[in-house]
C-alpha cells in the first residue's frame, strides 16, 4: 500500500482534480493500492471531512494539531495510521506532508518518501504572504530543501520547477518525473461542438458578435489583477462587443472594473460542475501574471481547462512551462500582453484545442510517469 498524504489542504476544485482524481487514477490503473490520508484544520473539521469523504469514501481524514508551525506534533497520529496500515511508501503533497513522510522513513516504518512538489513553496509564502507565522517563514526554505534533496523520488509540476531546484538547492539528480496539473474527469467529458458553444452562449446571454474574455479562478494576490486590468481596459474600450467575465468571487477590484464597464464586465460565482459550460461560452482565457518566482515555476490547471473548452489562452511571459509551450506548439494559443482587436474563435479551432488538451493534459498521458512512482527504490 502507498499513502498519498496531504497537510493543511482543504476540499476545493483543485483538491478534487489534483488529489482525489490522482488517487482514483492510480488505483484504477495500477495493482498497488493508494490511500489518501489528509490532515485538515480542526476548524469546521467535520464539514470539510464530509466533503472529501463524499468524493473518496475510503480516504482517512485526520485533524491537524492547531497551528501550522506545530506540524511536527502530527507525527504521533500519523505514526498510528502508518502502524495500522503498514504502507511501503508515502507520497507527500508539498513540503510539510513530505517532512512528515521523511519522519516515518527515519523511524524505519516506510521504505520511501516521495516529494510531490506543487510549487516553490518558500518563495510563495514570502512573496504572497500565504503564511505569516515568523517561525514557519524562518524555516520553510530549509524544510523545502530537505524535502527536495532527501526524498527517494520527486514529482515536479513543471520543468521550470526542476531548474529552480537545481539553482536554489544544488539538486543534481535524475530521480524525478514532471507531471503538470492535469484535467479531472469533468473536463475530460467536455464536448466542443457548434451546438454546445451556441447553447452555452445563449444561456449565459452572449450574442454571436460578442468576443468573450474569461478569467476563471482565485482573486488572490498572485493572480496579478493589475496586469490583467492593464491588458483588458484597452480591449474593452476598443469595442462594446468585447466582454469580460470573471468566474470567481467578486472583490473590490472586479467591482471597480464592473462599474467602469457595466455592460461589458460580469462576475459569476459557480459550483465546480458549472464552470465548463461558462468556459464554453468564451473565446479567450486569461492567464496574465507577474513574473514572480512562484509564477515562474507554476503549472496552473486553468491553462488546460481553458483549452479543453476551446478557448485560446492569453498568457504572460515566463509562466511555468506554458509560455514556451504556447510558442513551441504554434497551435493557435496566444502569447502576450498587448491589447488590440480580437475575433471570436472559429468552431474548427475550438475542436482542435479540445483535442490538444485531452492529448497533453489527461492523466492517462502521464501514465508512465505515475508508474515510475511505484518502483521500489529502497
Image (tube, grey):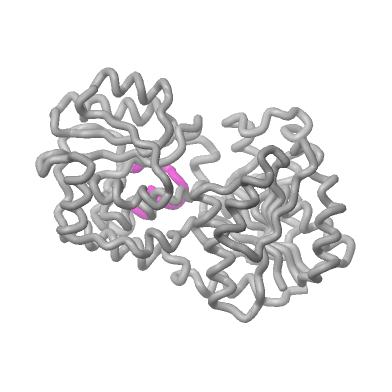
Q: Residue at x 58, y 54 (%)?
A: 162
Identify which residue, 326 or 215, lies in the foreground.
215
Is residue 147 in view?
Answer: no
Q: Is residue 289 visible?
A: yes
Q: Position of residue 317 (x, y in %)?
A: 39, 41
Question: From the viewer's perspective, is 352 left or right of 44?
Answer: left
User: Percent position (x, y) of residue 366?
Assistant: 49, 69
Which quarter of the rendering shows the C terminus?
A: bottom right
| Image quarter of residue 60 | bottom right
Q: Residue at x 68, y 64 (%)?
A: 153
Instruction: Please tell me which residue is depicted at 49% across the width and 43% down the height of the picture.
Output: 296
| Above/below status of 144 relative to 265 | below
- Pick the quarter of the image with the N terminus: bottom right
In reply to whether residue 321 is colored magenta, the answer given is yes
Viewer-side residue, 18 vs 107: 18
**In the image: residue 217, left or right of residue 90:** left
**Residue drawn 27% across the image and 46% down it:** 334
The segment highlighted magenta reads: 315-326
Amino acid at each position: 500500500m502507498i499513502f498519498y498524504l496531504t497537510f493543511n489542504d482543504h476540499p476545493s476544485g483543485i483538491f478534487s482534480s489534483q488529489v482525489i482524481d490522482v488517487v482514483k487514477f492510480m488505483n484504477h490503473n495500477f495493482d498497488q493500492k493508494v490511500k489518501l490520508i489528509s490532515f485538515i484544520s480542526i476548524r469546521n473539521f467535520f464539514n470539510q471531512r464530509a466533503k472529501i469523504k463524499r468524493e473518496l469514501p475510503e480516504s482517512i481524514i485526520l485533524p491537524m494539531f492547531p497551528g501550522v508551525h506545530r506540524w511536527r506534533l502530527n507525527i504521533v497520529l500519523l505514526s498510528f495510521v502508518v502502524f495500522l496500515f503498514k504502507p511501503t511508501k508515502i507520497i507527500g503533497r508539498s513540503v510539510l506532508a513530505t517532512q512528515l513522510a521523511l519522519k516515518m522513513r527515519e523511524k524505519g516504518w516506510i521504505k520511501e518518501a516521495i516529494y510531490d512538489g506543487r510549487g516553490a513553496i518558500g518563495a510563495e509564502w514570502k512573496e504572497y504572504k500565504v503564511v505569516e507565522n515568523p517561525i514557519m517563514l524562518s524555516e520553510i526554505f530549509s524544510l523545502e530543501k530537505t524535502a527536495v534533496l532527501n526524498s527517494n523520488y520527486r514529482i515536479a509540476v513543471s520543468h521550470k520547477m526542476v531548474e529552480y531546484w537545481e539553482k536554489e538547492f544544488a539538486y543534481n539528480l535524475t530521480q524525478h518525473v514532471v507531471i503538470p496539473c492535469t484535467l479531472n474527469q469533468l473536463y475530460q467529458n467536455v464536448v466542443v461542438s457548434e451546438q454546445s458553444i451556441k447553447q452555452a452562449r445563449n444561456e449565459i446571454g452572449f450574442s454571436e458578435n460578442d468576443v468573450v474574455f474569461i478569467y476563471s479562478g482565485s482573486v488572490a494576490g498572485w493572480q496579478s489583477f493589475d496586469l490583467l486590468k492593464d491588458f483588458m481596459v484597452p480591449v474593452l474600450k476598443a469595442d462594446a462587443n468585447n466582454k469580460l467575465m470573471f468566474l470567481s468571487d467578486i472583490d473590490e477590484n472586479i467591482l471597480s472594473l464592473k462599474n467602469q464597464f457595466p455592460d461589458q464586465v460580469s462576475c459569476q460565482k459557480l459550483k465546480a460542475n458549472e464552470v465548463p459550460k461558462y468556459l464554453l461560452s468564451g473565446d479567450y482565457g486569461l492567464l496574465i501574471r507577474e513574473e514572480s518566482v512562484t509564477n515562474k515555476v507554476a503549472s496552473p490547471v486553468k491553462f488546460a481547462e481553458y483549452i479543453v473548452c476551446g478557448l485560446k489562452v492569453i498568457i504572460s511571459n515566463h509562466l511555468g512551462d506554458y509560455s514556451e509551450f504556447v510558442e513551441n506548439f504554434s497551435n493557435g494559443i496566444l502569447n502576450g500582453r498587448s491589447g488590440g482587436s480580437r475575433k471570436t474563435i472559429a468552431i474548427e479551432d475550438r475542436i482542435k484545442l479540445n483535442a490538444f488538451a485531452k492529448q497533453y493534459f489527461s492523466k492517462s498521458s502521464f501514465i508512465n510517469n505515475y508508474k515510475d512512482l511505484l518502483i521500489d527504490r529502497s
